[in-house]
Amino acid sequence: MIKELINFTENLDEEFKNLGSMPKEGLHIRMKLVVSESGETSIDTSDFEYEQYSKKQKSKVSDIMSQCKLLHQNAWCIDTNKCFDLPTKAIHTCSPFAVAFKQEHLEGGAKFQENIGKKKQIYERFGEYFNKAFDLFENKEDAEKYVPFKYFFTNNTFTSILKRIDTDYSTQRIKFEEELLQIKEQLKNCIDKTQKEEFKIQAALIEQEILKVKPLEDSDYILFYLDLPLDLYKKLHKRYLGGKLFVIDKYNTPADENGIVYGASNFMNGLNGNMPFLIHQTAPFDISGRISNIDAKTLYDLQNIFPNKTLPNPLPVFIYKEEIQRKVIGIFKESKFKFSYKEIIQKLVEDNSEDIGNYYLLFWQNTKDGIVFKDFDFVTTFEYSISRDKPLAILNLFEIKEKGGKDNKHYPIIHNIFDFEQQIMKPFIQNKYLRIDYFGDLNKDDYAKLDLTFSSFSRYRKAIYDYVYKSQRNTVDGHMFDEMVFNAIKDDIKNNNDYGIKEKLNIWYSLYEYFNTKNRINMVNKLKDYQDFVATILADEPLADISDEKFAFAAGQVIEYILSKSKSADNSYNLLEPYLQQSKCAEFKRAIANDFGRYKHENFSKNFEKVAAFVLSYETSANLKHLLPQILSGVFSKNQLFSTNPSK
């Protein structure tokens, strides 16, 4: 896996690696070194640049912020465990040219209050920070010219700069807020629609300006930079990285004549130090493998790319075929980083007559603890087409209408696996917001009133992901399909969702044979048989091939007819619950008889009487819960028991 990720990253150009990255949220201040006539170097406290950045800003990132972004990227610590401010970990830069910390560490901030009497405040730790940062210079004499930047902090001069900026921002903020108040007052009294829109635009622009001068929050960074060439930042940052790119230096080899060092990768690696059960207990080696410092730097670059959201997720990492990998990157760049894995695969398939394959599929998440790999697997062949024989079709067997229309719904033909995911799998495991999160935390709140759907989602989401995204066609079988369908239908029954029930029954009948490969029954024909069986009863013709399934379907027709007589306030499908709970035929029929007795004062058709007589006289030892599909099919398919004669 590591080698493939290294090869992938090496195919990314420098421009791509930095695309999508943003400045740190907070206040950026760029200071200058000046040399007096006597040759003394000092920090210029009268002429400096500063700007505040917020992710809420909608305007394009300014040139100053773009430059500051590159500076802090080449001054930042790998992680806080490898910063120069241990053990407090408050200063997150690791460079003699930059200092970054959060507002919370300054006087009045939450961390400052927390540290009182317990830890040294940040004001007392700048000296140690710069001592370590100056060690990055090969020639110690080079560090001397930057000592004024150290004194700028150790002498607490930087706070006077912050006060001046705060005063300036406060003045601007008052001015903007007064302007905003005036515009809102004009908007309130305005009648003309065109003028109103202009006022709204003006108000929005001023609100954006206020974001640039708002008071700093505890979570905002304060970043000081020396105004020096980027190459100088990169040179010293490279020296910092050289000693930190491995998880621990104890496994490092001595540098060879080319400066190459091998060690344990720091990339997604904790050496299982907190999981002794994963550590080799009898192996003669401490670690399973080492990588070079060059490869470690490549992986570090990749780790910094993930948060930029410029890579599709999941990410296909092709092996042996660098031209396809470059094509993937090109497709994504051309789409302005909007294409998903699905759309990239579709574009690749268009250019390749055969199925694509031989790639690793990586799914990751950005979390508060950094990048977390949720899934990583090899895809030998990706089967884009859902069927080599013919496309799949959902039939409208239960005659549902187009939403908001009067015509019967027509389902689109299913040609590929992503259509299959959306039309077949999604309805059975999606949350109340009609979304699926394959790898997020299981959040029951998103499945309010969908208890059984949540159960299916929890158990089978990974299997469905593997089925769709990795072409592992053995991960979903007929049993799982049946369970997901009827779990979702039971939830729809509780929520009185007639449309959803019929939609899922349409899918179940249409796709039953596709999933149940060992028991290839054409359920569409079976449904027709059930309906014909009821028609035979109504026609007083001899009954042949009587089965438990046909009985269950006929019983469903009877139940729906009886429940249609209810004039109670509760017209929901909750009335079905007593039937769905029964497993024995006798109890099931008793429930039917009880409801019939409740509504016996109503008029009942001859058709009902014929089919009810058959149902109430039928005997079986079968578990009625196993006949749930047929019972529900009878309830929700077109009811044949209503009289065709209006007078009856």
Image: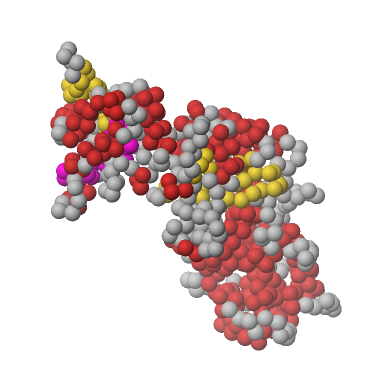
Left or right of residue 635: residue 130? left
> In terms of depth relative to the viewer, which is nearer, 617 or 89?
89
Task: Classify the position of the C terminus by image quarter.
Answer: bottom right
Identified at 70% across, 41% down, the residue is 356
Residue 594 x, y percent position in the rendering:
59, 84
Q: Is residue 347 visible?
A: yes
Residue 498 x, y percent position in the rendering:
58, 62
Identified at 62% across, 56% down, the residue is 464
Residue 475 x, y percent position in the rendering:
66, 59
Residue 101 is one of the magenta-drawn residues: yes
Q: Is residue 454 visible?
A: no
> In terms of depth relative to the viewer, which is nearer, 339 or 544?
339
When asked about the image quadrant of residue 522, the answer is bottom right
Q: Which residues are magenta?
A: 92-109
Residue 359 is one of the magenta-drawn residues: no
Left or right of residue 95: residue 363? right
> In terms of depth relative to the viewer, which is nearer, 166 or 602?
166
